[in-house]
Image (cartoon, rainbow, N blue to C red):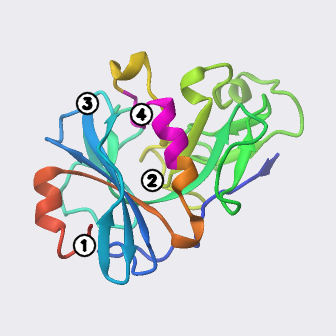
Amino acid sequence: MKILVFLLTILPLVGQSVPATSKQAVVAYTSSWNSSYADLYLYQRNGTQWKKVSDPIKVRLGRKGSAWGLGIHSSPKGATLKKEGDVKSPAGIFFIGGAWGDAPAIHKHPKLPYRKVTPRDLWVEDSKSPYYNQHRILPHQPKTAWEKKQQMKQNDFAHSLKLFIAHNPPPKAKPYAGSAVFFHIWRGGGSKPTAGCTTMSEENLIKLVAWLDPTKQPVYVLLSVSEYKAKRDAWKLP
């Protein structure tokens, strides 16, 4: 079994702000921690100034809203943290990893890694596995019940294009802290929440993937409006 790690950057130590080297930001604002709805915007930084470069994009989040995730930021002491199976989206600041999908090729930046998903592609959501929250490629067709359970989604339009959100990323993912968090296509035209991912229309996801430039070290910021306002200056948010 081999692994492909598609993080776009070399992850730095956990900090308290958006890295100075990050020139693109995908920012989603929720009305509260319990909301599964958010408005998402794209920002680009020129020097020290962030500029909004998109209209609002409607997205859906976890069924039970959001909770602090494991990313670039430091979560407040005593805060509710994202856990495996809690159907909450991770909040905070995260790098954005590679893309996966059903198509042989997609429109993207040349340096954005992309892989066409096959039946041999796994994303391990088993918290007891040493490969937890890792993409793995089997050298054979899935045989065991465990291998079949860890397969990446097959023949599912909502997962026909997806982009990794580096919450609790490999190679040092914390067991039970949450796995397989992606941007992907929403279900029911946005009428359905997620199990923890951030979803949007196919059209908007295609545009997002095409816009991302790995050389600009893009980040994803997901926060409630009140939390965003409280941390904007200290975390150097857009």
Q: Please tell me how crowded label 2 is: few (under 14), some (14-19), or many (20+) other residues with Cα within 10 Å.
A: many
Q: Quadrant of the N terminus?
A: top right
Residue at image coords 50%, 39%: 205
The amino acid sitting under disc 3 is Lys
Using the rendered view, name the quadrant where residue 86 is placed. top left
Residue at image coords 31%, 35%: 58
Task: Find the distance from the CA under tag 1 to the CA under tag 3.
Answer: 25 Å
**Image side of residue 119 versus residue 185, left or right:** right
The amino acid sitting under disc 1 is Trp
N-terminal-most mark, 3 or 2: 3
Q: Is residue 147 magenta?
A: no
N-terminal-most mark, 2 or 1: 2
Q: Position of residue 108 (x, y in %)?
A: 64, 52
Res. 95 visible in picture: yes
Give the foreground label among 2 and 1: 1
Name above or below for residue 31 compared with residue 150. below
Residue highlighted by disc 4: 200
Residue highlighted by disc 2: 167
Give the foreground label among 2 and 4: 4
Task: Find the distance from the CA under tag 2 to the CA under tag 1.
Answer: 18 Å
Residue highlighted by disc 3: 64
Give me the disc on residue 206.
Answer: none
Relative depth, front residue between 165 and 24: 24
Q: Please tell me how crowded label 3 is: few (under 14), some (14-19), or many (20+) other residues with Cα within 10 Å.
A: some
